[in-house]
Image (cartoon, rainbow, N blue to C red):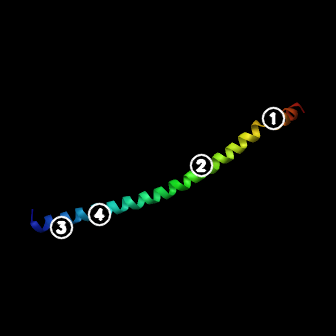
Amino acid sequence: MDVFVFVILITVIGGSIHLAKVWIRRNASANAARSETLEDEVDALRERVETLERIVTDEKYRLDREIKNLE
């Protein structure tokens, strides 16, 4: 193999590795931001479910449903 081809091949491989590292870092930071957004959404949904559970397990709510079922 010619020395010139060998030098170009090493340069291309080194540049590709550098670009791959940059791409991986950018994707990691984007995924971290998306993960934080999803965690916030999950927390909000948990609060809503807890509220709904309190409403459904309330005795007055249960009594109202039983009365409506009798009608």
Q: Which mark, residue 42? A: 2
Give me the residue at 60% from left, 52% from top: 41
**Of the residues shown, which amino acid type is indicated by label 2?**
Val
Q: In the image, residue 45 lies at what x, y percent?
A: 64, 48
Numbered disc 4: secondary structure: helix
Residue marked by disc 1:
59
Residue marked by disc 3:
8
Label 4, label 2: how far apart the Cα atoms are = 36 Å
Which marked residue is nearer to the observer: mark 1 or mark 4?
1
Label 3, label 2: how far apart the Cα atoms are = 50 Å
Give me the residue at 14% from left, 64% from top: 6
Mark 3 crowd level (few <14, some 14–19, many ≥20, 10 Å Cα): few
**Of the residues shown, which amino acid type is indicated by label 1?**
Glu
Residue marked by disc 4:
18
Label 1, label 2: how far apart the Cα atoms are = 28 Å
Say which label, 4 or 3, has the lower sequence index: 3
Q: Quadrant of residue 19?
A: bottom left
Q: Is residue 19 left or right of residue 8?
A: right
**Of the residues shown, which amino acid type is indicated by label 4?**
His
Q: Quadrant of residue 3?
A: bottom left
Q: In the image, residue 40 lies at what x, y percent?
A: 58, 53
- Which of the two residues, 45 or 13, is positioned nearer the viewer here? 45
For the C terminus, the quadrant is top right
